[in-house]
Image: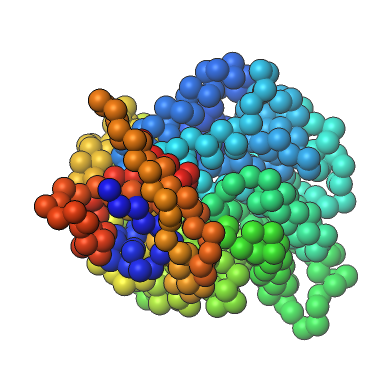
Amino acid sequence: MFISTAVSTAFCQNLKHEMRGAWLTTVYGLDWPTQPAQSSDVQIAQLTSILDDLQRVGINTVFFQIRSEADAMYESPNEPWSRFLTGTMGVPPNPYYDPLGLAIELAHERGMELHAWMNPFRAVSSRGPFGLSATHITKTRPDWILDVKYKGGDPDLKDEVVQIFNPGILETHDYIADVVRDVVARYNVDGIHFDDYFYPYPSYNITNEDESYYLANPRGHLTLPDWRRDNINRFVSTVAAKIRTTNPNVKFGISPFGIWKSGVPQGIVGLSSYDVIFADPLTWMAQGTVDYLTPQLYWAFGGAQDFGSLADWWVTQSSGRHIYTGQAVYRVDSATSSGTRFSASEILLQIDFGRSTTGIQGSVHFRASNLRPFSDNLGLTAALSGGFYAQKAFTPFMTYADTGSPDQPDNLAVTQNTSNVFLRWDPPLTGFAYANKFGVYRLRSDTAVPNSQDMTNNAANLIAISWEPEYT
């Protein structure tokens, strides 16, 4: 048996590194929990089952939604418990457990990274009949909240608004960054992940609701649209700095809408996120404030939103940062597909495209339920687990963040009984980097000590990724 640290370039430079992610959605219980106010035992069993299924399909990173409307799927000193967990905002699970702590434990036990997924600015996703906790931000700091009116054509919604943190109030940036810092400081997360909700999408797109804030502080000669983009750029930079000063090993990524501007690249037609939700991911990558982007490329090859053209374009703009394509597995599943249903081969072709394109380091699939064995996804789950993701892979190596390798583990001890082999080793305490996880390789060899380079060059030899210095 041979053990290699996953963060050691010497051992892993020839091993397949690929992002194989899945978004695990908790807003409205889309993936979990299936119903609020279920017993803790049922919720824990359901979450365990989801992670088991994702492990079997070959997923190596779970993007677990922990904050969808200024609430918490964890014990937060800043924000109330989510209504999507217990049915009542501000009420903890009973018997008590911590979903984020549990999700991290389950993911790491299964060799997967856990990225805590947050919606940064949304304060209330829908008004509905539910009550807001007295500690919710809309109650404690209503002066920070922006009401944005519905502007669509449905007469039943004409008086509706969505409520968001006002990005034009810079205090909100510090508040949200402190929420992030608290998670990074108290939980062993591998990453922090934001989705694409900055300023609202149509039919709640912002028009003049924040104009008074702009006129009060236009920051020189910025136009109103540039001022809004500057708000978001400043926010992303503030969060990135907070993460890196708290734990520089935690990755920070965002999944922007897949089209930056309509007409870019040539032939692409669609919503311009630059002009409508005022997101400018090119600036984030150029400034190095994000470690990766996962553009939501939820379209097929061909047509006015061609997957290949968009994926290629994002790579050209990446400034050396990682690009993971966001892929619409929900469009393969009969239960969730909208518009023209994808074939299973569409997703497989997109994965192949990413593997053959320099600058694309893998995929993230929306969403977890569409990858589970009961999904009517035209055999996609079997195609991934039995072929595309059959061999294990580490998450992509971020060479621009690398400071070197850790030293080798020491004192490997092997204990064997009739059915198991138990490995235990001492993690390296020296070197140029911290060894945060380990690869366990197995190879039959006619020599006493097989060549470690040959062993790690073949991904078939990797049988486990462990966050602990032991493996059975």
| Vertical comparison of 58 with 372: above or below | below
Residue 28 percent coordinates (x, y): 57, 32
Q: How many marks?
A: 0
Q: Quadrant of residue 299?
A: bottom left
| Vertical comparison of 398 with 221: above or below | above
Give the residue displayed 53% in from the left and 64% down from the top.
Answer: 430
Residue 112 percent coordinates (x, y): 43, 45
Residue 131, visible in the rendered structure: yes
Give the residue displayed 81% in from the left and 75% down from the top.
Answer: 218
| Vertical comparison of 139 with 119: above or below | above
Give the residue displayed 59% in from the left and 46% down from the top.
Answer: 188
Residue 90 percent coordinates (x, y): 76, 29
Residue 19 percent coordinates (x, y): 38, 55
Closest to the observer: 219 or 52? 52
**In the figure, is residue 14 to the left or right of 47?**
left
Q: Quadrant of residue 234?
A: bottom right
**In the figure, is residue 258 to the left or right of 289?**
left
**In the figure, is residue 454 to the left or right of 76?**
left
**In the figure, is residue 242 to the left or right of 135?**
left
